[in-house]
Structure formats: C-alpha cells, structure tokens
C-alpha cells in the first residue's frame, strides 16, 4: 500500500463548479499535512496546510480526519486558472521529510 | 517568501557523462535540503535528504554511488548524477527547509530537467 494515495484523475469540470479531492495516508503517526499545486513542468507550490480543525482560504477548504487518516480539498467556484495537478502531501514525523501523493489532475473548462 | 534556486534549469548530456545540479537557498539558511525526482505524469519521489555537514540519507532503491549529494554549506547542496544513462532523464527538484526558514516551511526550487541522450 502506498504511503499517500489520492483520487485517480483527471477531473474535468466546468467553470464555477465545486470539486473535491480526497487523500488517504497510511502512517497514523503522521504529523503535518499539506496540499500543493503543480503546474505542468513546474515545481510544486504550497496551496495550503491542513489542520485538524479544518481551514479555509478563499475558495479552498481543507479538512483532516485523523481517525480515518483522510484529507480532503474542496474547491468552490472553479476558475480556469485552477487547472493543475493537486498533490496531497504528508510529513510523517517531525522534521521536513515529505511524502507526496501521485497527484490528481484538474481541468477546468469554459 | 524564501527563494530556492537551481542550476542549471535544463541540461542535455551524452550517456556516460556526469551532471552536477546545484540547489541554493538564496535568502535563508537551510539545514536540510531534499532531492526529488519526477518522471512524466508521476509524482515527486524523494531520493535523499541532505543535511549540512553530514552524509546524505538515501531512500530505499536510490543508489548512493550514482547520485552523489554534497551539502557543504547552509545555502548550497549539490546532486551529481554520475555516468548518466537515458533512464536517468527526469525532472530533478530540490527543496530546502529548516534553519531561518522556519520550522514548518519547505521551499522548492524550480527544478532541473535532465535529458540523457
């Protein structure tokens, strides 16, 4: 079993749609969780951290369920510019070692 | 935010040659740097953790003698792909964290695209 597993993609949605990505992780001792965005042929960029209480940043909402070892990302009112690959990222223990999910591709169409 | 640079941004080389990739933290000191490899349509795979002043820690399946890592200062780590072969062609990305960058922040370099002919 992979350490971090994500929804298979791609997701094709129209502008304005709401889309949700899911991610599960296998190491119950994992401490930190993130969503990154990666555009084609570019480096990943931090989208948001994920906290147990859930957090929201504009149109983006991230949730963490430690009991189920599950992370989600919700994008509301999708924009064309949201088209990218979204990476679920887990930091298993203290420090900076980071495990990436395979990513889910999102295509937002006009 | 903090900036991490990589050099070169792309390189094409002949099979059998060695290629050195530099990763620099430009405005902060990074006690730890990470090297990742990403094949097309796949996610980033951690290759090794580079700690300033000590030996790198390699992930399972990554050959230490093929991917030489040196972290000689708090702002520079280098990855040398020795005797490169076509199967080493990939997108190599470094990231830096720790030190004055903060305790929970990891910054990525722009990546180096290696093509081995």
Image (spheres, coloured by chain):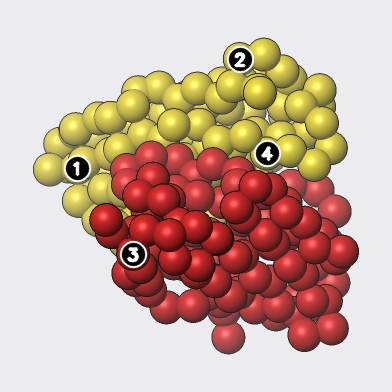
Chain colours: A red, B yellow
Percent x, y of residue A75: 55, 61
On whether disc 2 and disc 1 are found on a single subunit, the reply is yes
SS state under label 3: strand
Q: Residue at x 45, y 40 (%)?
A: A43
Label for residue B116?
Answer: 1
Instruction: Give the class, few, some or many, for how many residues have Cα within 10 Å of label 1's Cα (few <14, many ≥20).
Output: some
Does mark 4 fall on the same chain as mark 2?
Answer: yes
Q: Quadrant of the N terminus of chain B?
A: top right
Labelled disc at residue A14: 3
Q: Position of residue A64 (x, y in %)?
A: 77, 70
Q: CA distance from mark 2 to mark 1?
A: 29 Å
Q: Foreground residue, B35 or A65?
A: A65
The image shows a total of numbered marks equal to 4
- Give the chain of mark 2: B
Q: Are marks 3 and 2 in contact (CB under 8 Å)?
A: no
Relative to residue A4, is residue A107 depicted above or below?
Answer: above
């Amino acid at each position: 079993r992979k350490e971090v597993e994500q929804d298979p993609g791609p997701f094709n949605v129209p502008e304005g749609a709401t889309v949700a990505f899911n991610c599960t992780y296998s190491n119950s001792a994992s401490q930190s969780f993130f969503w990154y965005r990666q555009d084609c042929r570019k480096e990943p960029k931090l989208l948001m951290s994920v906290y147990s209480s859930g957090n929201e940043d504009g149109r983006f909402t991230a949730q963490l369920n430690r009991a189920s070892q599950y992370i989600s990302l919700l994008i509301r009112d999708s924009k064309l510019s949201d088209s990218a690959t979204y990476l679920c990222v887990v930091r298993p223990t203290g420090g900076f070692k980071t495990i990436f999910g395979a990513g889910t591709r999102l295509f937002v169409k006009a | 935010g903090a900036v991490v640079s990589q050099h070169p941004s792309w390189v094409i080389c002949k099979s059998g040659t060695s290629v050195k990739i530099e990763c620099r933290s430009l405005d902060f000191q990074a006690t730890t740097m990470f090297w990742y490899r990403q094949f097309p349509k796949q996610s980033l795979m951690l290759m090794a953790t580079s700690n300033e002043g000590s030996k790198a820690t390699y992930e399972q399946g990554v050959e230490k003698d093929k991917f030489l890592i040196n972290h000689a200062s708090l702002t520079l780590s280098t990855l040398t792909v020795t005797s490169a072969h076509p199967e080493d062609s990939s997108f190599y990305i470094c990231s830096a964290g720790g030190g004055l960058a903060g305790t929970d922040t990891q910054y990525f370099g722009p990546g180096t695209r290696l093509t081995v002919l």
